[in-house]
Amino acid sequence: MAEQGASTPQMTQAAGAEAEPAAVRAVRRTGLLVTFILGGLTATPPLAMDMYLPSLPEVTQALHAPAATVQLTLTACLLGMALGQLVVGPMSDKWGRRRPLLTGLAVYVLATALCAFAPNVEVLVAFRLVQGLAGAAGIVIARAVVRDLYDGTAMARFFSTLMLISGVAPIVAPLIGGQILRVTDWRGVFVVLTVVGLLLGGLVWARLPETLPCAERQAGGVGEALHSMRRLLADLPFTGFMLAGGFTFAALFAYISASPFVIQDIYGASPQTFSLLFGLNSVGLVIVGQINGKVLVGRVSLEKVMGVGLAVVIAAATALLLMSTGALGAAGLAPVAAALFVLMSAMGVTLPNAQALALMRTRHSAGSASALLGSSSFLIGAVASPLVGIAGEHTAVPMAVVQLAAALVALACFMGMCRPWNTRADTEGAGS
């Protein structure tokens, strides 16, 4: 990454433009379309999760299963997305981005369709696992494509833009899911998800070219992929950003997993009201993400912004815990919803900046780096999901406890391993 000799920025840019593959330049020329496609790929998790959320209470009744077991359908999907990224990320470094992506999307569509016909909760959990394994391709390869195309603050801005595109999914998905439940049952949700997957796969096939040239692909097999991952994990700040982002995601997923029961069963809201509140929270995340990308990036260090975001998450989780335990008196839906809005909004600066700061530390093996970032987040989130249900469906205390604990661990990893006071003096430490 370092510039050599006395070359000027203009000379460096000219040389880079000549050396840059034609395919990469072509993708940049269609930047808006590529942004939309990559946003759609990163929207796979919120679509698979959030459109299904309003129907969770109905699934417990239709399949005669306890809430904790039904929540395993979320955990299975999340676990599949975590493990799938560890496989697909190195594959994309070896074979390019398109082939693994299209294969994953095809399997995702098939698994999603089969979810609609699951006869019991055990089969639904199994199909959701396969859905997550295949859906991982879109998540990990979208981040790798961003790393192929951008660097530095441009990459951080692009991640914030992706949050705007993918952030539309959690806004509209629960609303769509709630409306689907007006005309059909929970199985209809998976039919809609199948159609969305088919449309996205067709768009990728037709309009997203390869962004990783053959000359830059990894020649090795599993051993080389494992070596790349070990090298990345040996870089302490990379691992710190990875863990900080992962535990922040755990706080987010505790909300995703528990909020349908907290909002609907404890506070008596309808599926449509829950969908509206969930959408408003997602609006907050998107707005803060855009402030991060359009205003803060390039003016304030990413580390400082991320630190403030983590502090806000901790404050909101603390308020939720105090309200859930009754320490602040009897709290109604409004103050709880306000605290959740603040917590979700703060994710708009913590999650994209954690990813950008980690990926800035590696130029090559972007697929493996993206796989580590994604899989760690989903694995930690998968652990958080069952924890929020261990005390039953009639208290919000487990959700608040998991959120606060996860946020505190994220802050500890960020401060102890990333050394944010150094403000990226060694950003490229992971090198390759």
Image: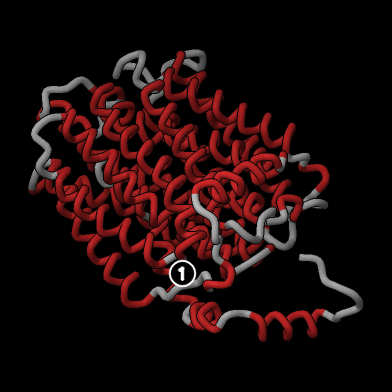
Secondary structure category for the residue under label 1: helix
- Residue at 68% over, 48% down: 305
**17 horizontally vs 111: left or right:** right
Amino acid type indicated by mark 1: Thr
Q: Is residue 118 left or right of residue 376?
A: left
Quadrant location of the N terminus in the rendered image? bottom right
Q: How far across and how far down the image is residue 229, in percent?
A: 59, 45
Q: In the image shown, does 15 or 293 lie closer to the viewer?
A: 15
> Mark 1: few, some, or many residues within 10 Å (few <14, many ≥20)?
many
Give me the residue at 29% from left, 65% from top.
200
User: Extreme right residue here?
Assistant: 6
* Residue pointed to by mark 1: 35
Q: Whole-percent x and y of residue 67? A: 24, 23
Q: Nearer the viewer, residue 309 or 254?
A: 254
Residue 380: x and y, percent? 48, 32
Would you place residue 108 above or below residue 3 in this image? Answer: above
- Residues 338 and 128: in front is 128
Note whether 291 is above or below 274 in the view shown: below
* In this rendering, position of residue 196 left or right of residue 24: left
Is residue 180 in view? no
Q: Residue at x 73, y 46 (%)?
A: 304
